[in-house]
Image (tube, rainbow, N blue to C red):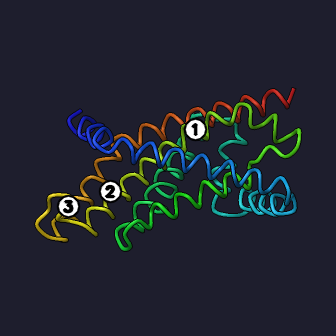
Amino acid sequence: MHIIRSCLAAIRSNFRLYVGLNAAYYLGMLIASIFVAYHPFLQQQLLANLKANLAHGFLSHVARAYQSGNMVAAALETFLVNSILGAFAWITLPSFLIPYSGVATGFYRAVMWGLTLAPTNRTLSLMMIPHSLCLLLEGQGYILAMFGSCLWGKWLIHPSRAGFSSAREAYLAGAAVNFRLYAVILPVLAIAAVYEAAEAIAVKALLGR
């Protein structure tokens, strides 16, 4: 509980940054969705790539879990992919090497979501009605990881302004904050994974009838 309270305190003390990241993330999705509506061939290619990845790529084991109808397995597979790859490897890990890089990779994900999932036809529009909540929940996990990356970069580039005596101290403090944030990120992504598994399997069962 102490770790969670410290995470919430970091968000409260940098609330404008947190709100700004939320606005930019979802606005990026919206702009990408509008753009791809006028360039449908791009979405078709991205959906084809996603389908191939689900069939034969590294996401094939996740697809098999969904196809089995086992909600626990589907939620677990989704959670592992989103937490280990989506949040840590894609956003937090790059921040160890390059300040703010996790913010850039996070925004890239938002844009790709918009390009791939824009409701440009009736099928996608119907699919996005229940799936929008999943994107909001999952997006929060990634935004929190981006928030940690942003704090880390700000402290490292201007350590004295943040009250640190050296860049090394700021770097270590930033690393600690990023790891503590996972006490909030992981539960958020877990909730999103359970919802996504339940949603997808329910839709599959409904269409199966």
Q: Are there few (<14), some (14-19), or many (20+) residues within 10 Å of tag 2?
A: many
Task: Classify mark 1: helix, strand or loop.
Answer: helix
Q: Is residue 129 positioned above or below 142 on the image?
A: above
Residue flagged by tag 2: what amino acid is it? Leu
- Quick one: 144 or 38, which is closer to the camera? 38
Which mark's residue is nearer the viewer, 1 or 2?
2
Q: Which residue is mark 2?
A: 151
Tell which residue pokes out farthest to the bottom in this image.
Answer: 97
Q: Residue at x 34, y 68 (%)?
A: 96
Q: Which residue is mark 1?
A: 136
Dots 1 and 3: beta carbons under 8 Å?
Answer: no
Residue 159's x, y, as percent? Answer: 20, 65
Q: Which mark is residue 161?
A: 3
Dots 1 and 2: beta carbons under 8 Å?
Answer: no
Which quadrant, please, contains the N terminus?
top left
Which quadrant, please, contains the C terminus?
top right
Residue 182's x, y, as percent? Answer: 35, 47
Residue 196, quarter of the rendered image: top right
